[in-house]
Image (cartoon, rainbow, N blue to C red):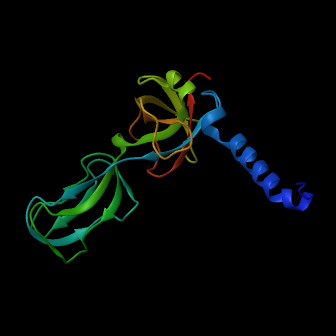
Amino acid sequence: MKRSPVALFPLVLSLLLFLLLAACNPLHGASPAEGHAGYAEADAAPFASVEAGRVERVYVQRGERVAAGAPLFALAGQEVRTAPDDVEVAEVMVREGETVAAAQPVLSLLSQRQLRARFYVSRDLLKALEPGRAVVLSCDGCGAGLPARVSFAARRPEPGRPGPVFLVEAQPDAPSSGLRAGQPVTVRLAGT
């Protein structure tokens, strides 16, 4: 049975689209020198009040970056709680005038020391990205490049992703790097 050219059009279009997407996939064909697309992430940690009381003042807003020692919040009649490290405020959980219990989280903070870049590589590139390997992170607002080191490389493929691909994480050498959680990054081997 002979098919008309019109009947073959959806099949040819689907094949071309598949080949285009495969050619554009940065995970499979990229070399470590070309770079890998990823994103920055950090685990948010609750920052709680030590004692119960009424929230007199909240000094920060969601998304704000705060230096170590900067004021975060104060309860009535108590000293001001300050940032334990350079942090980004992930969430403000209470408002001024509200009462909190002892150990109740008031803020959720992202420590700059916990920031890391997460990206995925194919099996053949995994060996070049062993833990301890120097890499450079690039992002908007990060300058020419941030020195970092691979801190984790998965030994098993990531489920649910086309591939197989493996998760790799890299931490900036300097905690106050200008990197923000959720920000897109490009990761390259240092010296390439």
Residue 151, position as x, y percentages in the image: 39, 30
| 159 vs 93, nearest the viewer | 159
Quadrant of the frame with the C terminus: top right
Residue 149, position as x, y percentages in the image: 44, 28
| 138 vs 28, nearest the viewer | 28
Residue 6, position as x, y percentages in the image: 89, 61
Q: Report the residue at 10% width, 70% height from top.
A: 53
Quadrant in which residue 24 is drawn: top right
| 127 vs 5, nearest the viewer | 5
Quadrant of the frame with the N terminus: bottom right
Residue 171, position as x, y percentages in the image: 41, 35
Q: Report the residue at 29% width, 65% height from top.
A: 59
Q: Report the residue at 51% width, 50% height from top.
A: 183
Q: How many tags in the picture? A: 0
Give the residue furthest to the front: 1
Residue 110 in view of the camera: yes
- Residue 14 placement, left or right of 100: right
In this rendering, the answer to whether 9 lies above or below 175 is below
In this rendering, the answer to whether 157 lies above or below 71 is above
- Residue 121 placement, left or right of 55: right
- Residue 59 placement, left or right of 126: left
Give the residue furthest to the bottom: 97
- Residue 185 placement, left or right of 82: right
Q: Report the residue at 53% width, 36% height from top.
A: 164
Residue 143 in view of the camera: no
In this rendering, the answer to whether 57 lies above or below 163 is below
